[in-house]
Amino acid sequence: ENGTQPELPNLVNVAANGTASASSVGHGGVAKRLIDGNYGPLWSSKGCYHSKNAQANQVSISLPGWEADVKYPINTINVYNRADTCCDQRINQATIYVDDTQCGQIIFKEGIVKYGFNCKGALGSKVTLKHQGQPINICEIEVLVLEEDIPAIPEFTNVAQGRPASQSSTGYGGVASRAV
């Protein structure tokens, strides 16, 4: 009754600091465009990913710390579709996964650019979008996690660096000290 609004949870897009990869790339639409912060839905905005062909395609976002198997409790995944009328319907039936757990499937609707999926805290270190029979054209993927639930990422130190190294044989000038 005092006029204050309840505090909304703070969601953080952890994909922004992740690594994007793709099964193929076409027309210069490289995978890093999936997480570059450019939400422009038209190809001319130079922010959309494009697969090479219409075979079995997939794009993945490896979240920070994936190398150490850090798992994030994923609240929401937002997929921003390309809006050019030549290509917007291609996203229909694409499926979204958190690691190996399916979080959702896109059902194309004319005029809709943002498709959001509640992943209910599914734990994962990688988000993947898979699609069969159509090229993938996506302009951005957000992976949203509650700020207080973002896991710590361990720091690693290369203990071998600067230490002596040995090997059983040497070929073509590949001495052991070059390994560390």
Image: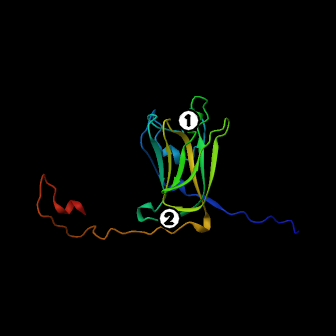
Query: Which numbered disc flags the more N-terminal residue, 1 or 2?
Result: 2
Which labelled disc corresponds to residue 71?
Answer: 2
Three-letter code, disc 2: Lys
- Please tell me whether residue 37 is drawn above or below residue 25 in the rendered image: below
Mark-to-mark CA distance, 1 and 2: 31 Å
Q: Is residue 131 left or right of residue 117?
A: left
Query: Residue farthest to the top?
Result: 86
Q: Position of residue 176 (x, y in %)?
A: 17, 62
Q: Is residue 158 left or right of residue 63?
A: left
- Viewport quadrant of the C terminus: bottom left
Query: Residue farthest to the right?
Result: 1
Three-letter code, disc 1: Arg
Q: Nearer the viewer, residue 61 or 99?
A: 99
Mark 2 surroundings: few (<14), some (14-19) or many (≥20) residues within 10 A: many
Residue at 48 percent across and 37 percent down: it is: 29
Q: Position of residue 145 (x, y in %)?
A: 59, 61
Q: Position of residue 160 (x, y in %)?
A: 27, 69
Helix, strand or loop at mark 2 = loop
Q: How is the image coloured?
A: rainbow
Mark 1 surroundings: few (<14), some (14-19) or many (≥20) residues within 10 A: many
Helix, strand or loop at mark 1 = helix
Residue at 54 percent across and 50 percent down: it is: 96
Q: Which residue is mark 1?
A: 90
Q: Position of residue 107 (x, y in %)?
A: 62, 42
